[in-house]
Amino acid sequence: MTSVTDRPVAPRADESARRTRGLKIATHTLRVVLLVIFAAPILFMFVSSFKPDAQIFRDIPGWRAFVPVGDISLDNYRDMFDRVPAERFLINSVLISVVTVTLGLVINSLAAFALSRIRWRGQRMLLSLIIATLIVPFETFALPLVWWVNQLPWLDMNGFSLSLTEGWLDTYRVQIVPFVANAFSIYLFYQFFSTIPRTWMRQPGLTVPAGSRSIE
Amino acid sequence: MVSPAVLLLILFFFIPVFLAFGLAFTNARLISPRPAEFIGFENFSTLFGDSVFWASLRNTLYFAAVVVPLQAGLGLVLALLVNAKVRGTNFFRTVYFIPVVTSIVVVSLLWEFMYQPDGLLNNIIRAVTFGHFEGTDWLSNPRTALPAIMAMSIWQAVGFHMIIWLSGLQTIPAEIYEAAEIDGASGWRTFRYITWPSLLATRVFILITITIACLSLFTQISVMTQGGPLDSTTTVVFMAVRTGYEQQQTGYAAAISLVFFVLVLLVSGVQRFLTRERA
């Protein structure tokens, strides 16, 4: 910087360009290092899933841990279906997610619509109550919930005869029904509905639901 | 229209929350022929005399104190790195985000395997330090078990907070940065006087969500260490689930849940107060 008076522009521009380039190289190196840290364990898991147990341990000290070489096969995957009813597990997961999400979309969007677009008594209060529940972690009431669902009745249909049974534990419904209504989902729908211009709603043929004063 | 959701929320949110308060003062059991009896503060006096509870509380607070700043900070670094206009940004974002979409149970099993004495991690440490440093049996050593779980938890969840930071960064108008460039502001000053103040709302959101997630630490413990070795990794929620589900002492578990609830409320209340918008 001593030569600034001699050559006012060039050295500064030079130095700043060098610094920018240095910074760019440094940040890109950091990006790549982080890439390796995030990808390596996942890659290791993926590659190991094709290897027999003994080979996984033999391969660990070295690059081979991350490359599908040696005794590669789909045996582990075949074993999974032989040892446990994995297809049943997959069906359970899909069934529970699909039903929960479908019911949730219907019920939460309905609630959000009422909260955002229809004017009724207690609307503001209910909205703030629902938003306030977001701060309560599920873990705080999970155990009382277990105790509670174990007391709940259910109407069982056995052919043509109906019977009232008690307890929801170890059923599909216990994994679905408590998780359908979701405060966060209601809030997201609410926010989206609130961005739709109100004039769009005042169209001929749009009727006001019974009991509500107006659609805003 | 609002009633189906409200009914379900009452049944599966409000009633269980109130039950947590009510059951905490009873000796209710998960499956029991006898009705629950009111026993006053007995659960709480048992709890406060239980050394496992104090260990759990200490571990939970220690975990939050380390993970909250590291995960939030690293998330911001990642967001800044992938916010730059360079080629392949989307690729980097995707890879940093992969652990988030991987189930925490799967991630826990994977890292448990990597943390073994002759596992991947110790071999990498040996290779990188040319044999000068030997790793340990990370999860069986009371000194390293919780830090090992901290590292894994940050690795798993930081991508999520990168996305939140990123959405905050992208709401900052480009004109402000252009103006700063014309004024000759350096990179650090641009960050200090433009980026950081613009991220106030994002910061508060990230702080509170990470804190609640950290205080609720359970899955990693349940999969990897079961609270051991020597109660060095037990947490409040893990203890509540163990007593409530495995030992079926619903009343006692409700008392633990209630203490946890108060803890979360206190911590997030203090955070809200500290991060409130000053006029």
Image: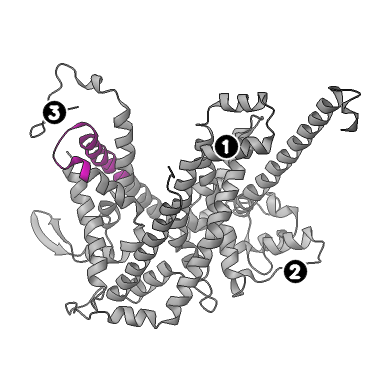
Count neighbours of disc 2 (C-alpha within 10 A) and say few if under 14, some if 14 to 19, many if 20 or more.
few
Q: Is residue B71 left or right of residue A193?
A: right
Q: Residue drawn at (28%, 82%), measured in percent from left and top?
A: B42
> Residue A195, percent across and down?
32, 28
In the rendered image, which residue does mark 1 sit on?
B195
Lower sequence index among marks 2 and 1? 2
Q: Residue drawn at (81%, 66%), measured in percent from left and top?
A: B132
What element does badge 3 sit on?
loop
The region drawn magenta spans A98-125
- Residue A107 part of the magenta-drawn span: yes
Question: How far is disc 2 from disc 3 in space, using C-alphas?
Answer: 72 Å
Count neighbours of disc 1 (C-alpha within 10 A) and say few if under 14, some if 14 to 19, many if 20 or more.
some
In the rendered image, which residue does mark 2 sit on?
B134
Q: Amino acid at mark 1?
A: Thr
What element does badge 1 sit on?
helix
Q: Are marks 2 and 3 on the same chain?
A: no
> Residue A141, percent across and down?
30, 62
> Residue A16, percent across and down?
79, 30
In the rendered image, which residue does mark 3 sit on?
A214
What element does badge 2 sit on?
loop
